[in-house]
Image (tube, rainbow, N blue to C red):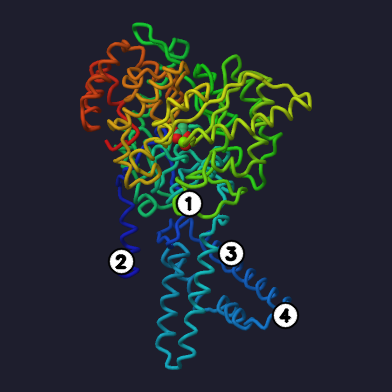
Amino acid sequence: MDDSEKIRLKRELKKTHFVKGIGVSPGIIIGKAYFLDRGKIEAPARVLPEFHVAQEVERFLAAVEESKKQLRKAKEKLLHEDAAGPSYIIDTHLLLLEDKKLIDSTVETIKQSWINSEWAMKINLDRLRKIFNSIDDEYLRSRKTDVDYVGERILRNLMGQDTESLAQLKEEVIIVAHDISPGDTAQMAKDKIVAFVTDMGGKTSHTAIMARSLEIPAIVGAETSSQVINTGDSLIVDGFTGVVVVNPSPEIMQEYRERQQIRQKMERELFQYRDLPAETLDGFRVKILANIELVEEIPSVLQHGAEGIGLYRTEYLYLNRKDLPSEEDHFEAYKQVVEGIFPHPAVIRTLDIGGDKFASQIVVAEEMNPALGLRAIRLSLKEIDIFKAQLRAMLRASAYGKVKILLPMISGVSEIREVKRILDGVRLGLSAEGIPYDPKIEIGVMIEVPSAVTIADILAKEVDFFSIGTNDLIQYALAIDRVNESVSHLYEPLHPAILRLIRQVVQSAHEAGIRVAMCGEMAGEPLYIPILIGLELDDLSMNVLSIFRIKKILRAYTFRECKELVDASMHLSIPDEIEDLVRTSLREKFPEEFRENFGFKISNDE
Ligand code: PEP
Ligand code: MG
C-alpha cells in the first residue's frame, strides 16, 4: 500500500465504527478525541483534521529546533573537552537539519496531506534515502547513515515524553493513547480530560485503578484504538461495557444519551444503600472498606459510607514529582487520611513501587521481569532510609486516629521479622524524641504471592491481620500478566485454583483468630460477592464506586445460600462453570438489573 492509499484509508475511517476494549471505570461520556503520543516507539501514522495542521507544522519545527539545540550542545561539549572527536560529523548533522529536501519538504507534506509530522518525515526520509542510494560514490552513499541519525533525533524529539503536556489543553477532551502511566492518569483530574481510551492494559492495571479513583470513565486494552481514532473524532466512551463508538451517527448518539440518563437514575437509586449495614438476610456481617490512592478521595469515601480505609496505596505520593517525598510529606498525607476517616481505621500500606507502578526518584536497574523483581517490600528492605521515613510517618499519624500498617508482597516470614526489627528501631527513636504514637499499632500483610498462601498458617502467627491482594495473587498463581491485554481473557478470578487459595487463607487466618480482608479488585466486583461471602471474608475493601452495588448484592443473599454456592463451586473444574453458577443465581435475585448493572466483571470479555 503506498502512502496516498494509506491516507485515503484513514480518511474513510471517519465513518461510524466501533472499537472494543475493557471497561475499567464506569460512566458514559460523549466528546472529542485527542490523541496523546505516549509510550510508543514506532512512529504513528495519522490523518489530521484541517484545523490541526498549522499546530502540527509548529510541532515539527519545534522538534527540529530542539534537535539543533541538542546537537550544538553536544558539539560545544566536544570542543570544550578538546576531544579530537569528530565534531565535523555534528556539523554535517546540523546542515541536514537546515536541508530543504528534508525539512521544507516535510512541512509541505504535512500541509498538503494533513498528516502527522512523524509520518510526513518518514515519507521524506525515504525519498532522501533513495537519492543517497543512487549515488555512485561509496563515501557519499554511506552518508545515508547521517540522514537516519538526524531523522531519528527529530523523531525522538517529536515523540519524547515531554513534548506534549496535557496541561495545555484548552477544551475538554477524551484522551486516546497507546498506553498511559498511572502518573499520567493522576494528572488528568487537574486537566481537561473527561475520559480515556488506551490500546494497552487490563482491569487491574494501576492505570485502571487510578481512573476509578478519580472517577474518570476509561477503557483499556482496546488494542487498535490509537491507530483508528484521530484527534477531533467524535467519540462515545462507554466505561461500563468497554465500547467506544467513533464518529457516531445521530441515531446512535441519541441511544447513548438515553442510556446515560438511565445510568444516572440507577446511580441515584443506589444511594439508599449508603447507611444500610453490609449484612446478609440472615445477619452475616462484613465490613465494607474503601481503597484509596489519594488523600483527595476522603470526602468521597465518607459520602459512600465506607467503614474505614482498607487499603491506602501510598506509592501515589511518589508520582508526578521529581524529588522524593520527605517524612513530613508522608506524615501530612497520612494525618489527613487518619483524621478524615476517624473513628474508623485506616490501613496504610508501605511503598509498593515496581511492577507497573514506577517512581523515577528511586533508581532501579531495568529488569527483565519487573513484576518478579525489586518491588514492594523487597525495595523497602533495600532502601532502608526511605522505608524508615515512611514507618516514622505512619507511627506519628497513629497518634491522630487509628492506623494499621500493611506490608505488600510478603513471600516469607523473614521479611516480616526484618520489618519488625526496623519498626522497633523507629519506635525507639520516636520514644526518645518524645513523639507520640500508638504503641499497639496493628501490622498486617498482603497475601498476594502464592508462597504466602501456602504458609498462611505460619504467617498468621506473626501478624494481626491479612489482606488478600487478588490482583497480584491471580497474576502470580495463574502466570497471567495483569497489565497484558492479550492474556486478559485468562485472568480468571473464579479459577478453582484461586478459590482454593482464598479458602486456605481464610481458614488459616480464622484458626489463628485474626481477621482477613480482601482488597484486590475482585472484592468490588458484583459477580464475585456471593462467593466471597460464602468463603467467609471478614472485610471487603474496594473502590468507592462499587460500594453501593456490593451492599445491594450481599443484602439480597443469606449466608447459607452463599455457602451453598461455594460448596457447589468446589465440585466444578473450570472457571466458566463456576461463573455460570453464580450468574444464574444473580439473575434469579436481580432479573431486572442483572445485565445493565451487574453484567461486567474483571476479565470483561462479554
Ligand atoms: C493487589 O495486588 O490485589 C493489590 C490490592 O495491590 P496492588 O493492586 O496495588 O498491587
Ligand atoms: Mg498487589
The answer to the question of whether label 4 and label 2 lie on touching residues, with beta carbons closer than 8 A, is no
Mark found first going from the N terminus, 1 or 3: 1
Cα separation, mark 4 vs mark 1, equals 42 Å
Q: Amino acid at mark 3?
A: Ala
For numbered disc 2, what is the local secondary structure? helix
Cα separation, mark 4 vs mark 3, equals 30 Å
Q: Amino acid at mark 4?
A: Asp
Q: Residues within 10 Å of mark 1 (few under 14, many from 20)?
A: many
Residue 216 visible in image = no
Q: Which residue is tagged 3? A: 62
Q: Look at 52% across and 46% down and name the residue there.
A: 374
The answer to the question of whether label 2 and label 3 lie on touching residues, with beta carbons closer than 8 A, is no
Q: Amino acid at mark 1?
A: Leu
Q: Under 8 Å from ligand 1: the CB of mark 1? A: no
Q: Look at 29% across and 41% down and name the residue there.
A: 489
For numbered disc 3, what is the local secondary structure? helix
* Image-based side of 466 in relation to 529, left or right: right
Cα separation, mark 2 vs mark 3, equals 29 Å
Farthest right residue in view = 433
Cα separation, mark 1 vs mark 3, equals 17 Å
Q: Which residue is tagged 4? A: 82
Farthest top residue in view = 282
Q: Which mark is residue 36?
A: 1
Q: Give the quadrant of residue 241.
A: top left
Q: Look at 69% across and 31% down and name the residue there.
A: 426
Q: Which residue is tagged 2? A: 5
State the quadrant of the C terminus: top left
Q: Nearer the viewer, mark 4 or mark 1?
A: 4
The answer to the question of whether label 1 and label 2 lie on touching residues, with beta carbons closer than 8 A, is no
